[in-house]
Image: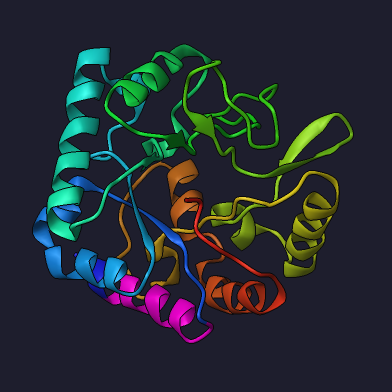
């Protein structure tokens, strides 16, 4: 397990620029590495839930999802000593088939979700979802969708993660700047392991190998440029 090394790298990059971010933390990580999670909160960052076991919503029944989300919330609040109000589903797995999860999250006391990706690939996405902050139900959670720009009738992700690794930085910068001008604040993300160029190689299907390894050596430099070129804050 290499989470402490890669997470410390993220905290250093943010701290050196006095930037605060939202960390969607897994419950089991908080239980195993409580001091690391406490360090996130101590440095002024927001602690939010990423579920407990990193199981996508579409791989769980509503009852299993509720138990997983509740367990993560309780663990994170106990470890970090803060109120957890935000949630992001593993693999952005709030899709049209799992919108029931939003009602469950609302019932558990969450105030916002950031799981909807207005695009479509082999794993996730709601391509016709709003591209700006919205409320799916009148009295429901506030949704902070991942940021995409519309080109040639398609929604193109420009918000980080694999997409930041795959695209030239000038495209990412242009895309986020365009989103800021036309839609508002962009939601940008990354995984700590994307800064870990020494992580072990694992045998997986080609599509997953691409997701987890492609252009990983470019991520730190792109992230540094991103943090210098834009202003950031927590979702909360």
Q: Is 4 positioned to the left or the right of 142 in the image?
A: left
In the shown orientation, is residue 197 left or right of residue 133?
left
94 or 132: nearer the viewer: 132
Question: In this rendering, is residue 56 above or below 194?
Answer: above
- Majority secondary structure in the magenta region: helix
Name the residue at the bottom extreme: 16
Visible in this render: residue 123? no
Q: How many marks?
A: 0
Q: Is residue 216 visible?
A: yes
Please tell me in which quadrant of the rendered image residue 157 appears: top right
Q: Nearer the viewer, residue 172 or 41?
A: 41
In the rendered image, the residue lying farthest to the right is 152
* Horizontal and vertical percent position of residue 224: 59, 79
Q: Determine the image quadrant of residue 125.
A: top right
Residue 100, horizontal then vertical, whole percent: 40, 13
* Rendering coords of residue 197 (x, y %): 41, 74
- Identify the magenta region: 5-17
* In front of the other: 111 or 49: 111
Which residue is found at the position 65% from the left and 69% from the top?
A: 231
Residue at point 44%, 54% (across, down): 212
Q: Residue at point 57% right, 20% down?
A: 136
Residue 60 left/right relative to 187: left
Magenta span contains residue 60: no
Q: Quadrant of the N terminus?
A: bottom left
Picture colour scheme: rainbow
Query: Which residue corresponds to the image point at 34% horizontal and 30% vertical from the top-left?
Result: 56
Kindly indicate the quadrant of the structure image that contains residue 219: bottom right
Would you place residue 209 above or below residue 100 in this image? below
Query: Where's residue 162, x and y in %?
Result: 56, 54
């Amino acid at each position: 397990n290499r989470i402490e090394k890669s997470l410390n790298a993220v905290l250093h990059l943010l701290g050196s620029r006095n930037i605060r971010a939202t960390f969607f933390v897994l419950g089991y990580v908080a239980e195993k590495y409580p001091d690391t999670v406490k360090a996130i909160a101590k440095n002024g960052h927001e602690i939010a839930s990423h579920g407990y076991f990193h199981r996508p919503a579409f791989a769980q029944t509503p009852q299993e999802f509720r138990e997983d989300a509740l367990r993560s919330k309780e663990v994170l609040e106990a470890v970090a000593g803060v109120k957890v109000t935000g949630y992001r589903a593993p693999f952005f797995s709030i899709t049209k088939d799992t919108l029931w999860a939003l009602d469950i999250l609302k019932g558990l006391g969450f105030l916002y979700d950031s799981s909807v990706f207005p695009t479509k690939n082999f794993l996730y996405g709601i391509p016709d979802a709003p591209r700006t902050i919205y409320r799916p139900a009148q009295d429901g959670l506030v949704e902070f969708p991942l940021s995409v720009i519309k080109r040639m009738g398609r929604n193109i992700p420009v918000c980080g993660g694999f997409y930041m690794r795959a695209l030239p930085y000038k495209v990412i910068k242009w895309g986020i700047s365009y989103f800021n001008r036309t839609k508002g604040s962009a939601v940008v993300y990354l995984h700590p392991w994307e800064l870990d160029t020494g992580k072990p190689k694992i045998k997986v299907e080609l599509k997953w190998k691409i997701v987890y390894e492609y252009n990983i050596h470019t991520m730190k430099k792109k992230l540094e440029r991103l943090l210098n070129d834009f202003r950031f804050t927590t979702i909360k």
